[in-house]
Amino acid sequence: MALIVQKFGGTSVGGPERVRHVAQIITDTYRQGNDVVVVLSAQGKTTDQLLALAKEYNPKASKRELDQLLSTGEQQSVALAAMCIQGMGFPVVSLNAWQVGFKTNTTYGDARISKIETERIRMELDQHKIVIFTGFQGINRRDDITTLGRGGSDASAVALAAALRADLCQIYTDVDGVYTADPNKVEGARKLDEITYDEMLELATLGAKVLHNCSVEMAKRYNVRLEVLSSFTGNPGTKVKEVVKKMENSHVSGVAKDKDIARLALVGLKNEPGVAFRIFSLLSNRKINVDIILQSIGRDDQKDISFTVSRSDLEQAKALLEERKDTLNYESLEVNDHVAKVSIVGAGMIGSPGVAAKMFEALYDAGININMISTSEIKVSVLVDEMDADRAVQTIHDKFFRDFNRRR
Ligand code: ADP
Ligand code: ASP
Ligand code: MG
């Protein structure tokens, strides 16, 4: 007998038929003698609809009130699923974050999980009940409801699996597993049987929303056995683990795209010590995360620094830099929010200098200009114009995976 955490995303529970199907997966697992803790997202597009609804009342609503509203999506979802499972004759209880004691910090809209009480869930499991828990939400020390950021139910599931020392955490979604690129957008994308935590974390952080990046981080930290699979097909999914057997052909595991990015360029800065420090400490004091940074070689006592931030931080970053124009001492500020970041990820690229060149060659062949480049041991990212992004992903994917696909 094992303790299994199963998470189902919005599409997987997007209506009565879907919930009945999911209930079958859950009760099959239960009937095999396992303890089952289920984490659900809001049904279908409920979270988007709630956000749109909030806008009708106040486009500038506080994050606290938004969380209060958004959390109702998951609350509905768990109650309806529990009713369905009840109807099938199984013992079941739905619980929300408050009832469980699923604690987070106070950052509304993007809270971090701080502690999970396990007593209530254990008590229900001891009574042989299937537990259905609300993903995406927590409570903070003020007893307010918080949410974990879009896609955050994955993090709820992995955190619960870690806290309960579950034997397995299964993330059921609307595709068969983790692919070499988004299978809904990229032709020839293929499913990976396995991927390392590190590669998955990079892919998730760089835009592959199949898993929330915090969920992968936690899975790695607490060594949670993690699996991504489809609630539609029953096909074997992708295992996310510490070490994997290397694929035959590639140094690269996947290609990802992130459009939530904007570039700022400070032109005509003084070429002297302390300039970068002043700019980036100013931004970090306001908790604005900076990603790719590029500094030009200084000429005639002047240099330029450009960098990227997420689009939601753009206005604040711009206002801050304009406000401090005199102290920062630059000539002009250029802003571009029609850019996208395209990345390749792969543990196998360490010590393989040809990999980055191969990516750049693919872009050159497609006539796509690179605006910025950033690399780490297991990834290469480029900033391109937003309108080129989808083509860039496809052409890079073709370059790295075409040979393999042809052989099949
Ligand atoms: P859920 O509602 O189940 O949480 P999401 O929409 O958050 O599902 O994530 C699943 C989606 O992630 C897929 O439908 C797919 O379009 C997208 N996706 C992006 N990159 C990848 C990838 N590398 N592998 C698989 N799916 C990906
Ligand atoms: N319902 C939330 C969202 O749409 C959380 C999730 O689906 O993981 O972002
Ligand atoms: Mg998701």
Image: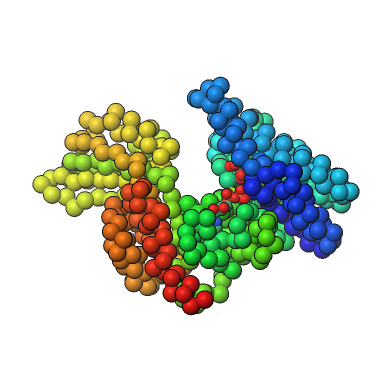
Could you say which is closer to the camera, residue 52 or residue 314?
Answer: 52
Instruction: Report the quarter where the N terminus lies.
Output: bottom right
Q: Residue at x 66, y 41 (%)?
A: 42
Left or right, 282 with reference to 54: left
Q: Which residue is drawn at 67% across and 41% down?
A: 43
What x and y, as percent, mark residue 61? 53, 25
Q: Residue at x 58, y 28 (%)?
A: 53
**Colouring method of the image:** rainbow
What x and y, as percent, mark residue 106? 58, 34
Left or right, 150 with reference to 121: left
What x and y, as percent, mark residue 367? 28, 59
Quadrant in the rendering for residue 324:
top left
Q: Up-down: is 221 above or below 274?
A: below
Q: How many numbered marks appear?
A: 0
| Residue 117 visible in the displayed image | no
Left or right, 18 with reference to 330: right
Q: Which residue is drawn at 77% across and 40% down?
A: 80
What x and y, as percent, mark residue 350? 41, 70
Could you say which is closer to the camera, residue 150 or residue 304?
Answer: 150
